[in-house]
Image (cartoon, rainbow, N blue to C red):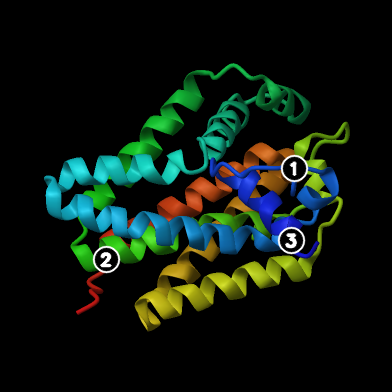
Amino acid sequence: MVLEPFVAALRFLTIVPIPGQVGTDSYSLAASTPWFPLVGLLIGLVCAPLAWLLWWLLPHAVAAVLVTSLLFAFSGGLHLDGLADTADGLFSARSRDRMLAIMRDSRIGAMGVIALIMLLLLKTTALASLDLDRLLAAVVLAPVAGRCAILFMMALLPYARPEGGLGTLFYSRRSRLVGVWGVVFFLACALLVTGPAGLAVAGLTLLLLAVLALFLKCRLGGATGDTLGAACELAELSVVLAFSCTLWSGS
């Protein structure tokens, strides 16, 4: 069934309840990565009208908190967990093997907590600073950026865990063409949502991801499932911050 990988991506990346067993097998999950950008777009398109409603009904600071909550609730906090684990490992100042071991530990450490607090504060305050046009553009584009970032990082980096992990499943079908597809999809969405200004936002996000990839290559020798989740969250944050710093408006 052609759509099984799409259903697998929807199951993995969101908390959307899907009845039946379609997309639950490992083959469908391994083949699901090309669908990640579309799932990101769906998240954005669902959250945007809710953000519009909250913006009109509530004080903008309160609306921003709830919009931020919506964005991470749709993924069940999956990528936030990756960010916390990545921060714990990378900022431990240990050897490569020890950092990877720390990242595998399910317990969250001080650096993970700090990273989560900083991310949520920055995203919330940035969203609160936006007018309605930029808020809606950011809410649509940020989830796309995050899911495309996963493909981009997989194209740039090998898998870092020799003993394997969840990322091994996705890396078993790794293709740099899928990474190119993610970049093209991101750029196209940015152009459609905001026009030429969106290309600047997308370009800045891709540049930051490339720097992150270089840093991970030096520190860990590649990527893990946790670092892919961290890249997703940081790409979302990059988009939101870029909109908060630009004079673009949809008018």
- Numbered disc in front, either 1 or 2: 1
Can residue 199 be seen at all in this image of the molecule? Answer: no
> Above or below — where is 209 with respect to 16?
below
Q: CA distance from mark 2 to mark 3?
A: 30 Å
Residue 25, position in %: x, y? 81, 43
Residue closest to the eye, 1 or 187 = 1
Instruction: Identify the secondary structure beneath mark 2.
Output: helix
Q: CA distance from mark 1 to mark 2?
A: 39 Å
Residue 225, position in %: x, y? 69, 40
From the image, tell me which residue sits under label 3. 155
Q: Is residue 237 left or right of residue 30?
A: left
> Above or below — where is 218 with respect to 140?
above
From the image, tell me which residue sits under label 2. 134
Question: Could you tell me which residue is drawn at 83 percent across and 44 percent down?
Answer: 26
Instruction: Identify the secondary structure beneath mark 3.
Output: helix
From the image, tell me which residue sits under label 1. 21
> What amino acid type is highlighted by mark number 2?
Arg
